Image (cartoon, rainbow, N blue to C red):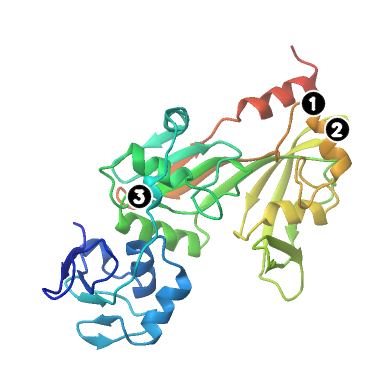
């Protein structure tokens, strides 16, 4: 069931951005915060504008003023003032080759969700100069799934398991599991020079800073949020190790910063890594971040069953390991 929209008889019809909208809350949206509800309805409108119209009392729920964190109930009507939206990301031109590439990358799908083996170099969503990302491609591929949303994110250069919900109720349930750290998230990373044998758990708080350019930079700091990663060496090579990392918390750039702080940064990491090491591995064919979301586990929000899915390494990563082993 989708939210119903009506408009005043005195104003233009929806789409022009110059009319008041009355949006009826559907059963799927029940329990969702007002701010999150509006951000979904107005995907391309800046968050600052959404919060501004709420704060000024221009957004009403059943004719009453409300706070951003107010949870909505099915059947309530949200009044939204005129908000002009930029062009929708669905209008972006997406090459058929990219549509096919993402289609081939789906490792699991049912009526409620899907898991994608995201290629490295592909952003999870459009914005910041990008006309499209994974979620825009999936919405194009699955037009019937009106509520397609990312359950979590991966850095643009990180490959591997990406969980996407098709329904608002499924997204809400998955977010609850993420908040409680109930998802299994395991990564494979190539680190250099070698992972310290005495270190199996890195427990270092991380502080995120956003530079004026919009770039995110994370550092170890006592003022940061608790961050825990478990590392296990899978394979040792002459000048690098392949490690498995199990996240106990989910902070921005957590694996990359924890690896750097342990003296063995991830190969190909242009932000936290060793540039000489990166250059050496580029010559061997690894021209990107050697970090792959290998395994993802979660409780299916509809069936209640535990699901555990694996994403195979992409060709560049697997080919590098073959060469490092001296195989042919």
| Secondary structure under the numbered disc 1 in the rendered image | loop
> Is residue 257 rendered to the left or right of residue 124?
right
x 39%, y 60%: residue: 86
Residue at numbered disc 2? 280
| Secondary structure under the numbered disc 2 in the rendered image | helix
> Is residue 59 rendered to the left or right of residue 76?
right
Q: How dense is the environment of label 3, judged by Cα within 10 Å: few (below 14), some, or many (20 and up)? A: many
Q: Work out whether 85 lies above or below 127.
A: below
Quarter that holds the N terminus:
bottom left
CA–CA distance between discs 2 and 3? 40 Å
x 72%, y 48%: residue: 231
Observer-nearest of 134 and 302: 134
x 46%, y 68%: residue: 46
Observer-nearest of 6 and 313: 6
Residue at numbered disc 1? 284
Quarter that holds the C terminus:
top right
Disc on the earlier residue, 3 or 1: 3
> Is residue 195 rendered to the left or right of residue 93?
right
Residue positioned most to the left: 9
Residue at numbered disc 3? 148
Q: Which of the 4 image quarters holds residue 111?
A: top left
Where is residue 274? Give x, y as percent. 85, 46
Q: Which of the 4 image quarters holds residue 250?
A: bottom right
Give yes or no for contact between labels 1 and 2 (Cβ–Cβ under 8 Å): yes
Disc on the earlier residue, 2 or 3: 3
Q: Work out whether 278 lies above or below 170.
A: above
Where is residue 264? Give x, y as percent. 83, 47
Q: Which of the 4 image quarters holds residue 138?
A: top left
């Amino acid at each position: 069931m989708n939210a119903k929209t009506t408009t005043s008889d005195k104003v233009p019809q929806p789409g022009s951005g110059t009319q008041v909208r009355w949006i009826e809350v559907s059963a799927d949206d029940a329990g969702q915060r007002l701010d999150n509800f509006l951000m979904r309805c107005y995907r391309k409108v800046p968050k600052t504008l959404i919060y501004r119209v709420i704060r000024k009392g221009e957004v009403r729920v059943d004719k009453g003023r409300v706070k951003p964190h107010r949870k909505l109930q099915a059947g309530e009507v949200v009044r939204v003032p005129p908000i002009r939206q930029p062009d929708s990301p669905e209008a972006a031109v997406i090459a058929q080759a990219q549509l096919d590439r993402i289609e081939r990358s789906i490792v699991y799908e049912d009526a409620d969700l899907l898991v994608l083996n995201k290629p490295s170099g592909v952003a999870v969503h459009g914005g910041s100069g990008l006309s499209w990302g994974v979620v825009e491609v999936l919405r194009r591929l699955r037009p019937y799934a009106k509520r397609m949303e990312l359950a979590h994110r991966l850095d643009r250069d990180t490959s591997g398991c990406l969980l996407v919900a098709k329904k608002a109720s499924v997204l809400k349930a998955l977010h609850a599991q993420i908040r409680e750290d109930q998802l299994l998230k395991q990564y494979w990373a190539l680190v250099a020079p070698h992972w310290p044998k005495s270190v199996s758990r890195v427990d270092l708080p991380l502080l995120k800073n956003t530079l004026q350019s919009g770039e995110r930079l994370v550092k170890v700091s006592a003022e940061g949020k608790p961050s825990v990663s478990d590392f296990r060496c899978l394979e040792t090579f002459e000048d690098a190790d392949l490690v498995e990392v199990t996240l106990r918390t989910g902070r921005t750039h957590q694996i990359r910063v924890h690896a750097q702080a342990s003296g063995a940064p991830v190969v190909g990491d242009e932000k936290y890594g060793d540039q000489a090491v990166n250059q050496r591995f580029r010559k061997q064919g690894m021209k990107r971040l050697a970090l792959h979301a290998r395994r993802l586990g979660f409780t299916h929000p509809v069936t209640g069953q535990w699901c555990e899915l694996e994403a195979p390494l992409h060709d560049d990563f697997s080919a590098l390991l073959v060469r490092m082993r001296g195989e042919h």
